Amino acid sequence: MSEKNREGKRTARQRLAEEREKQKAADRRRRGLIIGAAVIGVLGLAAVGGVLAANSGKEDKSETSGPAVAPSGAVGKDALAIPVGKDSAKASLAVWEDFRCPACQAFEKTYRATIHELVDAGQLKVQYHLATLIDGNTRGSGSRHAANAAACAQDAGKFTAYHDVLYDNQPPETEDAFAQDAKLIDLAKKVGGLDTPAFRSCVEDGTHNTWVDKSNAAFQDGGFGGTPTVLLDGKNLIEDRSMTPAKLKQMVEAANRK
C-alpha cells in the first residue's frame, strides 16, 4: 500500500473519530443544561415554560402523535428497521444513524461505496435504524422529518438512493434545514421517480413520524454510545480503531465463505 493511500485511510478514520467526539461533547453540554435547569427550581419554571410554549408553536407537526405506521417492508422487533440487500447474504450490518449527524455523514463518505458493492454482490444485508439524536441536542426537528421522508422513500422502493441524497446534502449541524418539508421534497427530485404526489403527501403529513419516534426510543434503550453505531454480526465497527473499508470487505467475504 502506498504512503498516500495509508495517509488517506488515517485521515478518514480521524475525521470520523473527530465527528464522534464533537457529538459526545454536544451530548455532555445537553446533559449539563438539563441538570442546570433542575437546579434553578421553582423560580425558573415560568421561564422554562415560556420557552417550551414558544417552541411548541414552531414544531406543531413534530408534537403530533398517532399510530406507528411502519414503512413498507420494515423488519425486526416492532418493524423498526429498514432492510437493504438480499436475505441470503451471510453477513449482516446494523446501522443506527441520524440524517443530521456529521459523524454519520463521515461514515457514509468513507464506507458507502464498499457497502454498496457488498450489497450488490449479495454478500451483505443491511438494516438501517433511524434516530433523532441531533434534534434532542438542538431542540430541532430535522432529524425526525428527514427520517420520516426516508421512510416515505422506502414506501416508494427508493430508500437507498434517497438515503444517499440526504447525506450528500446534509446541512450544517446547527442549521435545521431538514425540518422544512419543501427541502426534503426538493431533494427527492434527485431520485428518479420519487417526486410523486404520494411521496409529497407522506412527507407533509408526517405519516411515519410516530414510527420514527419508536425507532429513536429503541436507540435510546439500546444504550449505544452515539450515532453512527455500526454492528457487523454484532461486532461494533466504530470501536475498532483499525477498521477500514478494505477490512470491512475482508470480514464480509470471510463470513460468506463459511
Image (tube, helix red, strand yellow):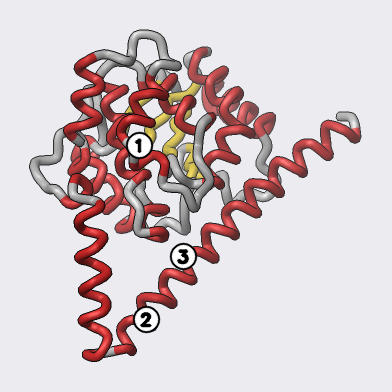
Q: Residues within 10 Å of mark 2 (few under 14, many from 20)?
A: few
CB of mark 1 within 8 Å of CB of mark 3? Answer: no
- The residue at which mark 3 appears reads as 27
- Toward the viewer: 196 or 128? 196
CB of mark 3 within 8 Å of CB of mark 2? Answer: no
SS type, badge 3 = helix
Mark pair 3, 2: CA separation:
12 Å
Q: Taking 12 as reference, is 143 left or right?
A: left
* First in sequence: mark 3 vs mark 2: 3
SS type, badge 2 = helix
* First in sequence: mark 1 vs mark 2: 2
Total number of numbered labels?
Answer: 3
The amino acid type found where label 3 is placed reads: Asp
Report x, y in % for residue 89.
44, 20
Q: Residue at x 34, y 9 (%)?
A: 193
Vertical relation: 63 (above or below) 24: above
The numbered disc on residue 35 is 2
- Toward the viewer: 120 or 70? 70
Q: Is residue 97 visible?
A: no
Q: Residue at x 58, y 59 (%)?
A: 22
Mark pair 1, 2: CA separation:
29 Å
Mark pair 1, 3: CA separation:
21 Å
Q: Taking 29 as reference, is 56 left or right?
A: left
Q: Nearer the viewer, mark 1 or mark 3?
A: 1
Quarter of the rendering occupied by the N terminus: top right
In which quadrant of the rendered view does residue 203 lie?
A: top left
SS type, badge 1 = helix
- The residue at which mark 1 appears reads as 146
The amino acid type found where label 1 is placed reads: Ala
Q: Is residue 107 visible?
A: yes
